[in-house]
Image (cartoon, grey):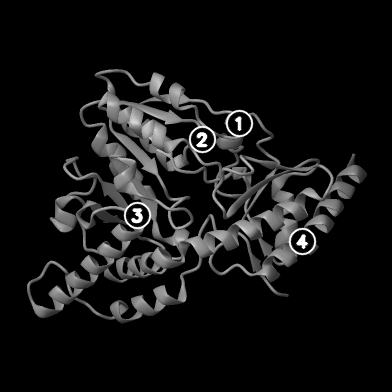
Amino acid sequence: MARHYLDHASTSPARPEVVEAMLPWLSFAADPGRVHTDGRQSRGAIEGAREEVAALLGARPREVVFTGGATEAIVAAVWGATEQRRHVVVPAVEHSAVRDASAAFGDVNEVGVDGQGRMDPAEVLAAVRPGETGLVHVQWANHEVGTLQPVAEVVAGCRERGVLVHVDAACAAGHLPVDFGALGADLLSVSAHKLGGPQGVGALLVRRGLRLRPLLVGGEQERSRRAGMENVAGIVGFGAAAATLTSALDHEAAGARARTDALIAAATAVDGVVTYGDPVDRVPHIACLGVAGVEAEAVLLGLDQAGIAAHSGSACSSESLEPSPVLAAMGVEAERSLRVSVGWSTTDDDVDGFRVAFPGVVSRLRSLRSVSE
């Protein structure tokens, strides 16, 4: 049976250019901090990748701090920003890494969203406490329903108030144009594996001139902003993915939009299936569906048996048994949603596989439920 991978928003396979770029460095052992020739070669590879990532994200190379992924970048941002002021403003639809790190290191003020999962900039900024707020979070786009957020308005308001603002761009980077410099944010987090780079590497962008206490200490790597031996191969792979996307982003985004439009059309042709999130102002690669009458986990298992990998907007099929806080904050059914997402390797055959399988899976599950009732 052919497999159809429609879970790129969770992780996307490494691009061929990424694998090719990484291979030589997997067996090249040299500390980038050493002055010998081998060490300088490693350092040169890291700095070349830093330039590529900076170019993709509209940043200066020196603003790029390589991390072990977006989660580490987020935790580092919160840890550094809450040293002086512990109050943190957190929209209810932020990723769990943002919510959990903020709760661990600060005093959280949660802000609600509308039925499409979008925050109101006025409400976010109204939650800022002069002299007390250390950080405001605003994601570029929601990771479950794909809705774009009013990131520019929130950032501008925070700058006017002299409050640090962190942007989680893991869902948007590599799928939409991201310009850190033009945005004016203080901190921005991204992950390589979400855009066809390797797993286990990401970056925290830190605005020029901003000094924060580092989360990881014990060495002078990353200009003393992130201690520990650099993942040279992973960083090189991240740079290769960024280099590819610098020229291919618009083309890939157009293809992703066409494929998610086709997935939505196929799904909503089934009675009782709706879309969640903004249908227009969304990232191009994510579609979130509400399926009436059946549990999300059962739909996922049925699709998996048909050769299709997808994800539930509810967390019931992952590590947690709790319904999705994102969907709950939107006021929609938090236990009956399905997220399908495409990426650089998605083909029309993958879309056709879903189109053929989905109606039958839902129909069978609804029939079983009717019999059991």
Question: As drawn, is 271 to the left or to the right of 32?
Answer: right
- State the SS at label 4: helix
Q: Earlier in the sequence, mark 4 or mark 3?
A: 3
- State the SS at label 1: helix
Question: Are circles 4 and 2 on residues that touch, CB within 8 Å?
Answer: no
Residue 202 pos. (x, y %): 35, 56
Gap in angstroms between the C-alphas marked 4 and 3: 35 Å
Gap in angstroms between the C-alphas marked 3 and 1: 30 Å
Q: Which residue is mark 3?
A: 57
The amino acid sitting under disc 4 is Arg
Question: Are circles 3 and 2 on residues that touch, CB within 8 Å?
Answer: no
Q: Which residue is mark 4?
A: 355
Gap in angstroms between the C-alphas marked 3 and 2: 23 Å
Quadrant assignment for the N terminus = bottom right
The amino acid sitting under disc 2 is Val
Gap in angstroms between the C-alphas marked 1 and 2: 8 Å
Question: Are circles 4 and 3 on residues that touch, CB within 8 Å?
Answer: no
- State the SS at label 2: loop
Q: Which residue is mark 1?
A: 330
Q: Which residue is mark 2?
A: 93
Point out which mark residue 173 bears: none
Question: Are circles 1 and 2 on residues that touch, CB within 8 Å?
Answer: yes
- State the SS at label 3: helix
- Name the mark nearer the viewer: 3 or 1: 3
Q: Earlier in the sequence, mark 3 or mark 2?
A: 3
Q: Earlier in the sequence, mark 3 or mark 1?
A: 3
Query: Badge 4: how crowded within 10 Å, few (<14), some, or many (20+)?
Result: some
Quadrant assignment for the C terminus = top right
Q: Is residue 27 above or below residue 270?
A: below
- Name the mark nearer the viewer: 4 or 2: 4
Question: As drawn, is 55 to the left or to the right of 222?
Answer: right
